[in-house]
Amino acid sequence: MRKSTISNFDHLLKYKSPIKAKTFRSTQIVSSINVESSEEKLQQMIAAGMNVACFDCSQEATLDEFQKSIGCLRSALKNYNAQRKS
C-alpha cells in the first residue's frame, strides 16, 4: 500500500470548487419579519444568510404597512446585491 504524501484534509483545502461558496447555500434560513423591521436590519439578515422571509400576519397591521415592509425587503435585497457585485 502506497503512503500518500498529502493528507485528505490538505487535498480538500487545495480543491478548487466550480461553485463559489458565497453564491451557494445548502441550508435554508427562514426568518419571521414584522412590520417594524428596518431596511438596514433586513440587509444584515440577508448578509448573515437569510434565504426566506416570512411575514407575521397575525399582528394587527394594515395592508399598507405590509406593503411598506415588502418594499423595504426588496430594496434591502437590491442594495445587498449591488454591494456584492462591487
Image: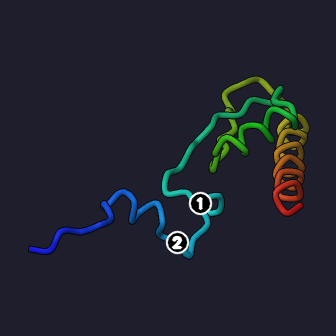
Q: Residue furthest left?
A: 1
Disc on res. 21: 1
Nearer to me, 37 or 16: 16
**Are circles 2 and 1 on residues that touch, CB within 8 Å?**
yes
Quarter placement of the C terminus: bottom right
What residue lies at 49% left-to-right and 51% top-to-bottom? 27
Nearer to me, 75 or 16: 16
Q: Could you tell me residue 7's position as x and y percent?
A: 31, 60
Q: Could you tell me residue 61's position as x and y percent?
A: 81, 28
What residue lies at 72% left-to-right and 44% top-to-bottom? 47
Which amino acid does the dot numbered 2 rest on?
Ser
Callout 2: SS: loop
Residue 58, quarter of picture:
top right
What residue lies at 74% left-to-right and 29% top-to-bottom? 34
Does residue 58 appear to the left or right of 9 in the view shown? right
Q: Could you tell me residue 73's position as x and y percent?
A: 82, 45
Spatial CA distance of label 2 from label 1 is 9 Å
Reading the image, the residue beneath label 2 is 17
Query: How many residues crowd mark 2 within 10 Å: few (<14), some (14–19), many (20+)?
Result: few
Does residue 19 appear to the left or right of 45 in the view shown? left
Q: Could you tell me residue 41's position as x and y percent?
A: 81, 32
Nearer to me, 69 or 86: 86
Does residue 4 appear to the left or right of 26 in the view shown? left
Q: Is residue 58 above or below residue 3?
A: above
